[in-house]
Structure formats: C-alpha cells, structure tokens
Amino acid sequence: MRGEPVTLVMGGLGVKGVASIGVLQSLHDHGVPIKRMVVAGAAALVAGQYALGRRLDGLTDAFVHFFEENRRVLWGLESLSGLFNSARRRGLESFSYFLHERLFCRANMSRISVLGWDVVEPLLDRFFEETTFRDLDIPISVSTVDLKTRKLYFIEEGSLKQAMKAAIAFPGLFPPVEYGERLLVSSTLCCELPIEALARDAAPVVAVNFPSVVPRERPRSLLEIIALTTEVRSNFIKEALLQEKADHVFRLEGMGRYRWGSYRRIAAMVEQARRETDRQLEQMSEFRRRNRLTKGAHDGEGAGHRAPGFTRSFPDNTIEAFNAAVKLGADGIECDVHETADSRFVIFHDNDIEGRSISEMPLAEIQQAKLAGKYRIPTLEETLETCRGRLLLNIELKLVYSLDRFLDIVRGLMKPEELLFSSFYGTLINELADLAPEIKRGILTGFPVKDPLKLVSMVRAQVMVPRFGFVTMALVDKMQSRKLGLIVWDCNTAEEIRTALAWNVDGIITDNPDTVLQERPKEK
C-alpha cells in the first residue's frame, strides 16, 4: 500500500475507537502515507495525537490510567450500575441500548446529560492543551452531528480540544458542545464511520471497520427492540457506504469479541487491532510480490504503453517530460489535471503546491511556481497542443468541477481516438459517460477489487486501470474476454514490465518507458 497517500477513515463505538492506536502504529511501521484523516468518536482523540506528531507508544497507558482513575464516576462501564441484572448483558453488548436504558434508569427527563465535562476535561487538557487545527502535521476532519441543522458537520478549524469534546459527546451521556452557532454531538451512533461526505480529492479512501458484538439473545423489552433496530440501521448504512465510497476496507474481525465499554481491555484491543492490520498489510504485500513474479502465458503483440514523461530527466507532468517521451518513442503519456480558482486547468500530480490547494490558487500564481527550480507547470491547452497527432493522451481527472468547459477545450484540440479519461472517482467517470460518450473512460483503482466487472459496469467505464501489484493474469483474461481494456500503473521494474507484457495488458503506465520499449517484442 506504499505509494499514493491515502485518506484514512476511522470510528468505533465507545472505547473501541481507542484501538485506532494499533491501526496507526501498523500503518506507520509499514510506511503507508496518510494525507488526511476523517474520524469520529474516541478515534478522533487518537488521530489528533498522531496528527500533532505525538508518539503513540504511551497513549494506550494514558487511556488505561484515565479509565481506571475515573471508573467510579465514568459511564459505570464495569458494573453497569443502575441497570437491572437482566439488562446488564444487553447493555454490555450494545452501546445504543446502554444509552437508552441508562437515561431511563438514571436520569430524569429534565437533565441534558448523565455526566458533565469535568470528568473528561483533564484528559483533553493534557492531550491537546491550546492547540488548533493549524498545528496539525496531517489534516483531520472530525465528524459530528449538528442538532440545530440536523445534519452531519465536519470540524476542520478552531480549537482541537473543543472539536474532540464534540467527537465524544455521545448523546445523553455528555452535554452537546457549542461550536460557534452550532450545537454538536458525536456522530458515531448514526454514522459510525464518517465516509459519506468525502469529496473527489479524498481518493484513495481507506476505512477501518471494527465489528460490534452480536447480541446472543432475543430482545425482551421495548428499549432492547429500539436499540437493536438502531444498530441494524447504523450497520446497514455503514456497509452501504463502505461499498460505495471506500477503495479499501480493513475489516478487523477479531475486534468483534470486544465490547464497546471494555476499558479494562484497551491494551488488548490496541494489540489486536495492530496485529490484524499488520497481517492484512503483509497479505497485500505478499499478493503484490507473488503476482509480480508470476509469468504469464499470453501470446500476441506486445502491449502499448503510456508514460508520464521521461521523469528521470525532467519533472513529471511537464512539457519537457512529454517531449522527451515523444523523442524516446513512447506511444502515449499520462497526465493529471486540476481546476484552478479562476476555472482554468493545469497539469500537476499533487493536489497542492507548497501546501496550498490548487483549487484555491489562480493560474497566474500557479505559473510562478518552478519545478526543480526552472520548469513551469503547464496548462491543459499547452499539453493538448504538445500531444495532438504525436501521442495518445491519458488524462487523469483529479479536482475538476467545470466539466463542460474542460470538455470544450479537449474537443477543440484533440480527437476522441487520441484520448482516454481516467479517474479514481466513479461518480466522475459516470458523469463523463453522459457528457462525452465518444471518449474512452477508465476507472483507476489502488487496492484489490472484489468484483472488477461489477465496478466497471457500475461506473460505465470501458477500461480498468488497476495498480500492477494487484493484477493477475486471470483478471487480464476476464477483462479482455468481455471486450474491456486493462491498463496497469505503478509498473516500473524490468521484471514487472516483462510480466505485464507477457500478460498482454492493453497499456502500461510507467516511469521507465525506455524499459518497456526495450522489453516488448519488436514488430515484424
């Protein structure tokens, strides 16, 4: 999973969110780059510490000490005091049931919450002091529910301490948090994993799913039925969103044995989450290694290829790199397009330049930037004029909102048969199917896809563009048997390129086009 930075989505009911410590430790140890974290519940506290550059080693002990120190007043997690004996097992298994029953048993209807913030504030003071979102090394979005607007609200600025209070303001347990004109509570009960509002630039999206304990007995009261229905609805929504929005999901099934309030087992939960994440990352690495070394048995012509320019000589996505690819004899190039603040289009790989989002910068300012000290960031028009009649052009759409304007420019300078549009955003590819049906469309993927044919059909693409490490010869055969194209990316070593050519893929996106030209069969 090393390579393109990911958007990490984490949640978890009750104290299970603290197990995110293990997930982040594993991702860090495996070198997985994170460009943004979207978090809910207790996972927000963990993400906040990590994004501030704090070490995670002592964080588990800090949480364990906090719960031990406050166990007599905080939540009644150990004994579930206030619940009848017959209800305690259900309360241990179900966070929703605990909150409903607890409020009926312990609080009168005039109180806004069972607990005040005085219990938790010392921990938040210790963790976050006077820090703000500006102090973060990695941007985070904290998912909450605004009781005034009745909508999800993502906190991305202001005091980290206040944001974290809102993240853990479980309805009825802690008071809602005033945040400007908003009145916020935790979103975990209605949306355990805050994945639904992610924008196009979030891809690739990696979500972490902590399963809940499955109740072993039939519901025996009105409150049990209400709580169970709430949980079923929440899980259904979560699974539907994971299917639609996540590029990869770490399903940590072993976490299902831990209850939402098992504060005495926090250390075990963290270790379990770390082991499971380690194992899944290692399985992914083994999958990539094994399939790189497998030799295909396809006969036929050598595959054509795309190249992002001769990037060892020039920065990628520059006119100089594109011209070098032409001189080398490449069949085509791949480039990345963004829309600027003044609705112009530039070719650049990353979403930001020197820490500023391209979508917030006008073209004139962007063109003042120099790559490697001397190379200018080109416009879409300059790139099209460089490539037309000379190269096939695979345009990866990143942050592009004015599609009609974009298509007018492209159609005015290049022919449909010279073009391929690709993107990680399925909704964008779907939209292009209506707006530009004459131009081929490819769906980019950075992780294993359970049902590739379903994905391609759902987004109305004609080409799948997966990372090479997750491609098998069987996948190539499956796509080509349905008259669908398959182009691989992140295919750079001579061994990888030889394997891709042997499988007769339809294209290779590589940093080393000279190696492809050297390895592919010579035309007779």
Image (cartoon, rainbow, N blue to C red):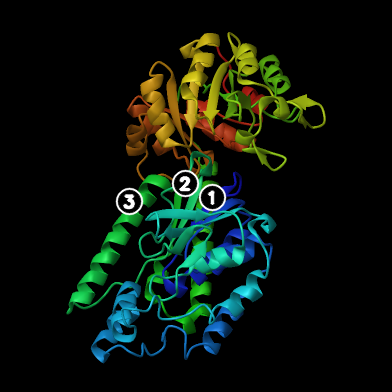
Depth check: 121 or 226 in front?
121
In the rendered view, would you say 404 is above or below 511?
above
Tag on residue 240? 3
How far is mark 2 from mark 3, CA to CA? 14 Å
From the viewer's perspective, tell me whether residue 374 is left or right of residue 339.
Answer: right
Placement of 329 over or under 100, stated as above or below:
above
CA distance separating discs 2 and 1? 9 Å
Q: Mark 3 packing: few (<14 Cα in 10 Å), some, or many (20+)?
A: few
Which of the two discs, 2 and 1, labels the residue nearer the N terminus? 1
Instruction: Please name the residue shown 65% across and 31% down the image.
Output: 511
Tell me the residue that label 2 is attached to: 198
Which one is earlier in the sequence, the residue at label 3 or at label 1? 1
Question: What residue does disc 1 label?
Answer: 7
Q: Secondary structure at mark 2?
A: loop
Is residue 217 visible to the viewer in this orientation of the structure? Answer: yes
Estimate how packed mark 2 is, as few (under 14), some (14 to 19) or many (20 or more) residues with alpha carbons within 10 Å: some
